[in-house]
């Protein structure tokens, strides 16, 4: 090919071009052309003839290509627009004619590509053999047809590149080659997302100034330029930002469009985007002049400053300040200070003193960023006056009423002092710092305290502040005991900053004892910072390891717990692994020797050794040393001799880390811990030990032994309990035990048979406690996902479940006879049933994906043994529900277990304690204990059991394992609420009140949460109000009665705790108590329910509501008889009512109407009962609070209006009948006036 081209080149330019065009499909053409063209000598005629021939060839190809693009007569595109569309045919392969036409266009594009190559080689000739004026016609022809080459990406790039080179070489008439090439290159940079394309556009930026942006034909290019402003590549690259800044100076209208686009992006832009916009704006401002600069300053920056001050949200104000930040950072640039002062000064100082705290806060942020704000054109005296004004405003804002403003003011003042310490008068410094340290470190707002600590810590970065801060910082040491974690962490940061200051000891700020106490007991983050603080004192790296270990032992002797925690973080805070291995050796040796150490110090050394071992286990280089230090025999001997729980825990922890493959010898020791552990409910130390043993056994594949041992203990405990209470005979229990034991591996039973038998006695309470300890372990295993699957798939599952059900049943039956009741069996049994049912549901859905959403638990392979989960719940409720009816009155129902066994158990226990036996009544009258504290304890037992069962119901209903429409669950929950109310009412005068115990308060809060959640689940399951069960209304009223009763019988303190729990469920309570009216209001238009229908039952919460409203009506809180009434503000129930009103007014109008009708219905019932206080209170609430003075759109509340009208009529009738009761008449007259104000207006 090259020889043929060379031969044609010697002939003529036309022959050379013809030969080149014939080879246009060859991949070797371009390098061959380069070799031949660049070898043409200066004397050759080709230097003048080749450009002319090239122009003719390109023109011919362009004409032919344009003709191929024109529609033919037979083409659909050539038909008249009025012609009907041709019938759509199936897609077929193109005809030979079409193939020829398409092939011709492609050949023409290849020829044009060859022409572009030749033109490019001529332009770039290293010796400039060709005249640009000769090449210009060809290049211009290709450029003008650039838009036609969209189907050939390579040709587009070649032509655009040719035009780009023409511009860069500054060749003649280069401005004629940009109208098509520049939009293409700009569009390419926006779509390809390549930095090289942005670089090319930026290099051609001067060419954009040649366009007339007032011409309508330039619209497409203008849109492309605007797109650059929101293209991430242009914002990320330096040249992209420079290009956008350059385009802002091209045209006034383009500038306005871009500024408007930037303004719209500020509220949503990320930090990097906003910083890019700031850079673009500053560059554009610096390069602009005249009207363009005025538009940026007055049209954009002025609006930004106003937006930064009046922004509605903190995030928006922060985003705007981020855009303004680049001007603040470049204040040294000529004109920036003058610009900022001119734009900010008229609005800033005024905004710092407005009533709106958000505006003051935003303006304060701006002042801090721009400090010192000064006019560069005035003399020094004027500048000093302006500076004093700024300090005055800062000090004023330090004592602002809004905590958010004080927070910003404290940090801002510290920042200003840090940066401008030299120019601020010493009196101002002293006054500011004293106020910050003495006043704001004790501020009621935690954020202000936190900002004080952060500000002082930042201020320490300026060495000139150290002398005065050495005096002030010790006054802040008490903040180390602040209950807020973030404040304690900030104090630690302050101490770390103090530690690095010469001649400033951190223990003068916080005592060493306080530091060690916090290191031992505080949060992990605080303990880690304290470890870093004490590292240079108790385990420095710059001294010999032996001396460092001696210092650490000093720490251990002073505070063993702190020293053990110190070891937990030592490796992460800079100590070398080699030095810590030596420290581990010293600690463990000293713990074994017990030399001059007390028991706490020995335990601390063991814990420290375990912590060090755990930290070093992540270091590969330390594993060999640890294995040598802690051999299997050594650990086993230490475990057998260790006496304390902490020491045993530490040794087991070391064993699980150092030699996990050789733990078989620890199996028997672990089984002893599992079997012999006592009560676990309140023993956190024993719980930690048992959990660690669980993890150790599970990780080594001993789960079957663990769970088998628990199954055997539970089976033995349940059998003995049933025998003691006469439910089973001894022979039945033994046969059942043997039958079930046959399924258990002998390995687990061998240990339990002889060791666990010692745990059982003749007292049922002790047998129950033994079973409760094992039940706690089962519950703990089910609680963690790591062990739950193993439990649910274990062969012992049915045995464990059967035993737990019996023990739980005994616990429920005996809850009124035993003073102390462990809830572990009940909780373990319900958790096990819940997760088993959930597993069965999952397997059912996997097997039958087409099943509907109504889940039913399958008994196949289940622990329920043919019993559905709903039947199981009903059985538990049957055992527990009978206690609720009697216990609140002080009479406890008789257990279904044999009475003589109960009395025998109680007498045995009291004989041990040398206490007298209580009298008991007949089985039908109930057992009435004489000791009131026993009554309280047993009522607490009943409450705990019923709350646990309620939690079980709610969890199962939430998971859709049981039906949400079962009335039994609602009735049980209502009964529980009434039980608590009755218990409070009957025991309100006792010194040991029902809710004075912490566990009872927590239990009532939990019961309320579960009941409200059940209400939510049930209401959410219905699509229409007609479907909601009527019992829902009763439950909602009972829950509201519970809140009111707590305040009436116990006090506002406990009531506020219940209200905080009730707040998230308030919408459900509103829907609940108004659902009956919603259901009835859809059927009739008059007042739905007569007052006589509900007269016998006045909800307590409505009585309290009426009482609150009456207190508000009495301005002096005193009636005619001189009786004092409490102020309405003393009732915390009022806060709940206010939240209820807010939700009703913001919510659905139908719900508001139903609630109003419900209140009026109870008002009418109070009128029939002649309870005029209740009538007046409810009428005042409805007319003043619920409806309000603005009056509702009564066309939407026709039912409510009818009920108001009927109530008005009844009140008038009651006034007619009431003659002798002046006090009652006065109240009814007030009620009538309130009702008439709405009825007559309508």
Image: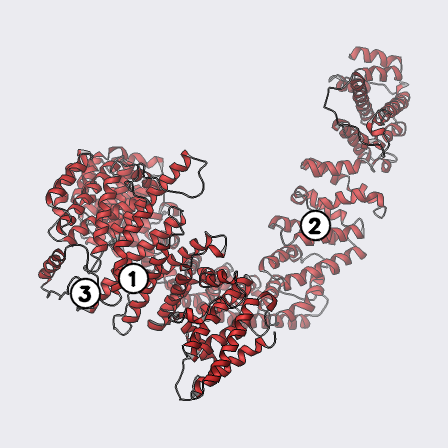
Characterize the local packing of mark 1: few (<14), some (14-19) or many (20 or more) Cα atoms within 10 angstroms: few
Residue indicated by mark 3:
925
| Label 3 – label 2 distance at C-alpha | 89 Å
The answer to which of 86 and 334 lies nearer the viewer is 86
Vertical position of residue 551 compared to residue 1189: above or below: above
Q: Which of marks 3 and 2 is nearer the N terminus?
A: 2
Are circles 1 and 3 on residues that touch, CB within 8 Å?
no
Q: Which mark is residue 999?
A: 1
Vertical position of residue 169 compared to residue 544: above or below: above
* Element carrying mark 2: helix
The answer to which of 1149 and 478 lies nearer the viewer is 1149
Vertical position of residue 1182 compared to residue 549: above or below: below
The mark closer to the camera, 3 or 2, is 3
Judging from the image, the colouring scheme is secondary structure
- Residue 264: x and y in percent read 68, 53
* Element carrying mark 3: loop
Residue 199 located left or right of residue 1197: right
* Element carrying mark 1: helix
Quadrant into which the N terminus falls? top right
Residue indicated by mark 2:
280
**Count of numbered tags:** 3
Characterize the local packing of mark 3: few (<14), some (14-19) or many (20 or more) Cα atoms within 10 angstroms: few
Q: Can residue 1193 be seen in this view?
A: no
- Residue 490: x and y in percent read 44, 59
Vertical position of residue 554 compared to residue 711: above or below: below
């Amino acid at each position: 090919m090259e020889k043929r081209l060379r031969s044609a080149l010697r002939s003529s330019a036309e022959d050379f071009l013809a030969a080149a065009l014939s080879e246009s499909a060859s991949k070797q053409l371009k390098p061959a052309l380069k070799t031949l063209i660049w070898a043409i000598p200066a004397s050759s005629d080709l230097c003048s003839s080749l450009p002319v021939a090239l122009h003719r060839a390109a023109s011919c190809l362009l004409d032919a290509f344009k003709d191929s693009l024109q529609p033919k007569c037979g083409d659909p595109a050539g038909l008249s627009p009025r012609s009907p569309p041709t019938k759509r045919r199936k897609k077929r392969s193109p005809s030979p004619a079409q193939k020829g036409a398409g092939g011709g266009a492609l050949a023409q594009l290849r020829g044009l590509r060859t022409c572009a190559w030749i033109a490019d080689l001529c332009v770039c000739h290293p010796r400039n053999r060709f005249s640009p004026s000769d090449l210009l016609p060809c290049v211009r022809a290709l450029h003008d047809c650039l838009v036609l080459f969209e189907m050939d990406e390579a040709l587009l790039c070649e032509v655009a590149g040719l035009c780009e080179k023409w511009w860069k070489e500054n060749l003649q008439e280069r401005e004629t080659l940009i109208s098509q090439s520049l939009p293409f290159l700009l569009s390419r940079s926006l779509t390809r997302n390549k930095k090289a394309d942005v670089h090319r556009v930026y290099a051609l930026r001067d060419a954009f100034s040649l366009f007339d942006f007032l011409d309508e034909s330039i619209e497409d290019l203008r849109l492309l330029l605007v797109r650059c402003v929101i293209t991430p590549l242009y914002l990320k690259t330096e040249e992209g930002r420079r290009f956008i800044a350059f385009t802002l100076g091209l045209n006034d209208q383009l500038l306005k469009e871009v500024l408007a686009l930037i303004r719209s992006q500020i509220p949503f832009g990320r930090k990097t985007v906003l910083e890019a916009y700031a850079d673009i704006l500053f560059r554009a401002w610096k390069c602009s002049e005249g009207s363009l600069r005025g538009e940026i300053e007055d049209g954009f920056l002025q609006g930004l400053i106003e937006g930064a001050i009046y922004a509605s949200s903190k995030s928006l104000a922060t985003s705007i300040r981020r855009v303004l930040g680049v001007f603040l950072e470049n204040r040294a640039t000529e004109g920036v200070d003058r610009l900022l002062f001119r734009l900010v000064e008229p609005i800033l100082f005024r905004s710092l003193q407005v009533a709106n705290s958000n505006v003051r806060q935003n303006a304060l942020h701006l002042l801090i960023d721009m400090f010192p704000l000064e006019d560069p054109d005035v003399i020094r005296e004027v500048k000093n006056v302006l500076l004093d004004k700024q300090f005055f405003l800062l000090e004023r804002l330090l004592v602002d009423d809004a905590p958010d403003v004080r927070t910003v003011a404290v940090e801002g003042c510290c920042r200003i002092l840090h940066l401008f310490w030299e120019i601020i008068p010493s009196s101002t410094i002293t006054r500011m710092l004293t106020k910050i340290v003495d006043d704001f470190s004790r501020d009621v707002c935690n954020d202000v305290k936190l900002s004080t600590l952060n500000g002082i810590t930042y201020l320490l970065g300026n060495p000139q502040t150290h002398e005065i801060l050495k005096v002030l910082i010790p006054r802040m040491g008490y903040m180390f005991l602040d209950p807020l974690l973030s404040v304690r962490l900030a104090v630690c940061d302050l101490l770390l900053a103090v530690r690095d200051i010469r001649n400033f000891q951190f223990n003068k700020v916080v005592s060493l004892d306080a530091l060690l106490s916090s290191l031992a007991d505080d949060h992990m983050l605080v303990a880690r910072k304290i470890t870093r603080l004490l590292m240079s004192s108790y385990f420095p790296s710059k001294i010999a390891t032996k001396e460092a270990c001696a210092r650490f032992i000093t720490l251990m002797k002073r505070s063993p717990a702190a020293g053990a925690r110190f070891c937990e973080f030592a490796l992460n805070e800079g100590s070398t692994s080699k030095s810590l291995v030596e420290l581990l050796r010293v600690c463990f040796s000293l713990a074994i020797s017990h030399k001059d150490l007390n028991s706490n110090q020995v335990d601390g050394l063991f814990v420290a050794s375990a912590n060090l071992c755990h930290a070093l286990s992540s270091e590969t280089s330390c594993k060999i040393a640890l294995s040598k230090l802690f051999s299997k025999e050594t650990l086993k001997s230490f475990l057998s001799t260790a006496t304390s729980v902490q020491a045993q825990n530490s040794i087991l922890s070391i064993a699980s880390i150092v030699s996990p493959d050789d733990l078989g010898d620890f199996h028997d020791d672990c089984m002893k811990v599992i079997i012999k552990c006592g009560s676990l409910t309140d023993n956190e130390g024993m719980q930690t030990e048992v959990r660690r043993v669980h993890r150790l056994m599970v990780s080594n594949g001993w789960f079957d032994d663990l769970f088998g041992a628990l199954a055997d203990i539970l089976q033995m405990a349940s059998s003995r309990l049933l025998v003691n209470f006469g439910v089973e005979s001894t022979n039945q229990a033994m046969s059942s035990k043997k039958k079930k034991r046959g399924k258990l591996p002998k390995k687990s039973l061998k240990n339990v048979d002889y060791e666990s038998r010692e745990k059982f006695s003749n007292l049922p309470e002790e047998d129950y406690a033994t079973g409760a300890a094992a039940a706690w372990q089962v519950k703990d295993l089910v609680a963690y996902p790591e062990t739950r699957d193993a439990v649910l798939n274990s062969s012992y599952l049915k045995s464990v479940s059967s035993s737990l059900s019996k023990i739980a049943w005994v616990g429920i039956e005996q809850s009124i006879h035993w003073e102390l009741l462990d809830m572990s069996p009940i909780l373990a049994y319900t958790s096990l049933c819940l997760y088993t049912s959930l597993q069965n549901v999952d397997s059912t859905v996997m097997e039958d994906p087409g099943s509907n959403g109504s889940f039913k638990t399958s008994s196949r392979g289940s622990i329920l043994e043919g019993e559905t989960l709903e039947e199981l719940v009903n059985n538990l409720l049957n055992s527990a529900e009978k206690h609720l009816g009697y216990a609140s009155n002080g009479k406890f129902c008789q257990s279904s277990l044999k009475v003589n066994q109960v009395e025998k158990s109680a007498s045995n226990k009291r004989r041990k304690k040398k206490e007298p036996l209580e009298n008991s009544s007949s089985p039908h009258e109930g057992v009435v204990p004489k000791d009131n504290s026993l009554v309280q304890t047993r009522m607490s037992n009943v409450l705990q059991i019923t709350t646990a069962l309620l939690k079980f119901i709610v969890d199962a209903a939430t998971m859709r394992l049981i039906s949400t429409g079962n009335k039994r669950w609602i009735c049980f929950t209502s009964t529980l609420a009434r039980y608590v109310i009755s218990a409070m009412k009957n025991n309100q005068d006792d010194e040991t009140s029902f809710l004075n115990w912490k566990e009872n308060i927590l239990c009532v809060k939990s019961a309320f949460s579960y009941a409200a959640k059940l209400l939510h689940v049930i209401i959410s399951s219905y699509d229409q109000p007609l479907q909601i069960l009527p019992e829902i209304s009763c439950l909602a009223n009972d829950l509201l009665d519970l809140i009111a009763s707590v305040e009436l019988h116990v006090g506002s303190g406990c009531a506020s705790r219940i209200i905080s729990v009730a707040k998230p469920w308030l919408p459900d309570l509103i829907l609940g108590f108004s659902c009956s009216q919603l259901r009835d209001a859809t059927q009739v238009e008059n007042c739905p329910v007569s007052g006589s229908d509900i007269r016998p039952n006045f909800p307590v919460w409505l009585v309290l509501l009426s009482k609150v409203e009456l207190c508000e009506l009495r301005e002096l809180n005193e009636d005619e008889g001189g009786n004092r009434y409490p102020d309405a503000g003393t009732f915390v129930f009022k806060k709940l009512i206010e939240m209820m009103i807010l939700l009703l007014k913001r919510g659905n109008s139908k719900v508001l109407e139903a609630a109003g009708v419900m209140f009026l219905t109870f008002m009418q019932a109070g009128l029939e009962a002649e309870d005029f206080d209740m009538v007046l209170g409810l009428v005042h609430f409805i007319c003043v609070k619920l409806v309000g003075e603005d009056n509702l759109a009564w066309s939407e509340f026709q039912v409510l209006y009818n009920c108001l009208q009927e109530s008005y009529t009844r009140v008038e009738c009651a006034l007619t009948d009431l003659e002798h009761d002046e006090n009652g008449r006065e109240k009814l007259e007030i009620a009538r006036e309130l009702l008439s104000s709405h009825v007559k207006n309508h």
